[in-house]
Image (cartoon, grey):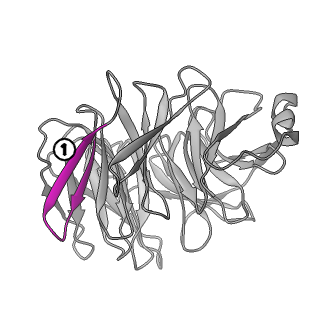
Amino acid sequence: MHGITRRGALALGASAFALSHLEAARAAPGTMQSWPLGAPRRTGIHDVAPAPDGGVWFTAQASGHLGWFDPKSARTELIGLGSGSSPHGVVQGPDKAAWVTDGGQNAIVRVAWPQRKVQVFPLPQRKHYANLNTCAFDRDGDLWFTGQGGYVGKVTAKSGQVSVKEAPRGRGPYGICATPAGEIWWCSLAGSFIAHIDRRTGESTIVEPPTRDQGARRIWSDSKGRLWVSEWNSGNLSMHDPAAHSWRQWKVPGADPKPYAVYVDDHDIAWVSDFGSNAVFSFDPRTEKFERFAFPREGAGVREIQGRPGEIWLPESGTEHISVIRTA
């Protein structure tokens, strides 16, 4: 791959509070365990992704780093991504590296793991500031990404070439996901729709939700290729089945729900964070019932959810904590 290389890391010791959590009994299934990040400065933790070594990556949007948290030792490490960095999304690639959407550098950044070698893939110079948000890999191993400024793009895995297209209806592209078949879907927060990408041409086809102006913020696929959408404006958790061309919606419990992040685990349970009630909910589509997990700190601000089998990871951007709910 082509790219600009940089390297640099800062290891941070665990705080006494984190160590007290570490020494406590492992959290029982269905309960939440939390740690403060213990960084010497505010990281602005935003998105998370499981790392291949059992740790958890996170984007430190305020400090310009890729973070790595080790739940065994409660240790945090920060890897510098470059001058002006302001990372938003992170996913683990087929190559076991961390791939980051970096709005500050207007670039996609790859961090090899465990080498910590940083490669920067700038967007084409002719493109304006994209306000990069999130990314996902298709079945060919190419990375697709969104830019809230009104762009959708791709990093071709074999060559490292970055290509960008203007999104239909302009600004708003936010969440993005891959289905089990490797197809790519994204959603528009400002446009209130979801869209499917033709991976050959890069063009997007809009699919209109039944609720107008619902504010589709994040999107995630279950094992059947059904698409789960968090609707910031409507307060709904919605599901679109492309095969059946159908939609279903469920109102998130609470007086004024503000669903932000959505993730579907290995048992096809949907998880959604709610700014309105400072909680995260699980939703079982078989029973159509929500279960609420409240945060012990006010203003947790969970903007993204990812996990691995048996673990749901929650980055608290409002409190500088990272939490996990163990489901097994």
**In the rendered image, which quarter is residue 46 located in?**
top right
Say whether residue 286 is visible.
yes
Question: Identity of the amino acid at label 1?
Answer: Gly
Place of residue 5 in the rendered image (x, y in percent of width and height, measured from the top left): 64, 60
Place of residue 296 in the rendered image (x, y in percent of width and height, measured from the top left): 62, 25
Magenta residues (range): 237-251
Q: Nearer the viewer, residue 127 or 141?
A: 141
Q: Horizontal placement of 216 versus 94: left or right?
A: left
Q: Horizontal placement of 303 versus 151: left or right?
A: right
Label the magenta part by its dominant secondary structure.
strand
| Residue picked out by circle 1 | 170
Residue at the location (62% across, 70% down)?
Answer: 96
Q: Is residue 207 above or below residue 210?
A: below
Residue at the location (44% across, 52% down)?
Answer: 263
Quadrant in which the N terminus appears: bottom right
Helix, strand or loop at mark 1: loop
Q: Is residue 248 magenta?
A: yes
Q: Horizontal placement of 216 versus 308: left or right?
A: left
Place of residue 243 in the rendered image (x, y in percent of width and height, measured from the top left): 18, 71
Say whether residue 84 is visible.
no
